[in-house]
Amino acid sequence: MTETRETLRTNLLNQIDHDNIPAHIGIIMDGNGRWAKSRGKTRIHGHQEGARRVKTVVRFANDLGVRHISLYAFSVENWARPSFEVSALMRLIRAYIVRERNDLHAEGVKFRLVGRIEELAPEIIKQAEISTELMKNNPGLSLNLCINYGGRAEIVDAVKKIINKGFKADQVTEELISGHLYWPELPDVDLMVRTSGEMRTSNFHLWRSAYSELYFTPVLWPDFDDVELLNAILAYQNRERRFGKISEQLGKE
Ligand code: FPP
């Protein structure tokens, strides 16, 4: 980290309210392809650099006291990409799970996959299960790697589970649907970050982002670091979260 970056980080850390850290941060890690193209490299190289960034951001979020981080690593729509890119992403994801296991465990992080996991390659499922089991009692942040994930697919899958259990229409509530999402204990997303300047949420955590604060940055994912995460958290802390109420009602309960 350059001296200026270090100074920036210290300044931002001084401004952060450590009692108001978002409990659940969702990140749409976009811009790997453009990052690589601007350097005359392949898209796969961009994804590799993107995967490297994950370590910095997860470690720093854990240190800050973030409880959950959801990373959009592969959407249900991403299967439509060229097959060599899909294969490379799957290899990268598997390698990440294996390579980072011991470090994540040492940092006290929990790990899980979120999405239509049963459709993934058995080797990815197996490696993820090893990590989830190893880290299940850790006290730190839970790293939710969203793979073969789609927000609409998650709601459809929840509704199917509910119907299969025989619930009647008048028994269907928001809590019942929340309770049938992929990881029911995962709370709503407080802060949703998207890199690369695109301003949409692309079917990520559709149900859990109903009241998320949205933060868009032009920074491409392979350039996103702890300073960028602090910028996002600071922006979040400067928002007034009203959840449908008016300002005067806040802080009175
Ligand atoms: C979007 O950038 C990124 C993805 C579809 C994949 C995200 C994957 C990673 C960051 C690496 C794998 C992650 C882990 C945890 C191992 P894009 O390809 O759409 O970029 P572009 O819009 O510039 O083309």
Image (spheres, rainbow, N blue to C red):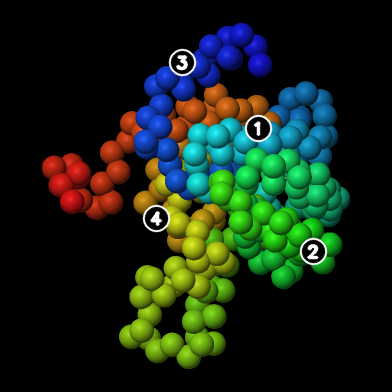
Q: Is residue 168 left or right of residue 163?
A: left
Badge 2 vs badge 1, beta-carbon distance below 8 Å: no
Looking at the rendered structure, the kind of residue marked 2 is: Lys
Q: Tell me: residue 45, above or below residue 126.
A: above
Residue closer to the observer: 164 or 187 = 187
Which is nearer the N-term, disc 2 or disc 4? 2
Label 3 vs label 4, nearer the camera: 3
Which is nearer the N-term, disc 2 or disc 3? 3
Q: Which residue is mark 2?
A: 126
Q: Residues within 10 Å of mark 2 (few under 14, many from 20)?
A: few
Q: Which residue is mark 3?
A: 11
Q: Where in the figure is residue 34, as x and y percent of width and height? A: 70, 32
- CA distance separating discs 1 and 3: 19 Å
Which is nearer the N-term, disc 1 or disc 3? 3
Where disc 4 sits, the SS reads: loop
Looking at the rendered structure, the kind of residue marked 4 is: Ala
Which is nearer the N-term, disc 2 or disc 1? 1
Residue closer to the observer: 247 or 42 = 247
Q: Which mark is residue 210?
A: 4
Q: Which mark is residue 112?
A: none
Looking at the rendered structure, the kind of residue marked 3 is: Asn
Q: Is mark 4 within 8 Å of ligand 1?
A: no
Badge 1 vs badge 3, beta-carbon distance below 8 Å: no
Which is nearer the N-term, disc 3 or disc 4? 3
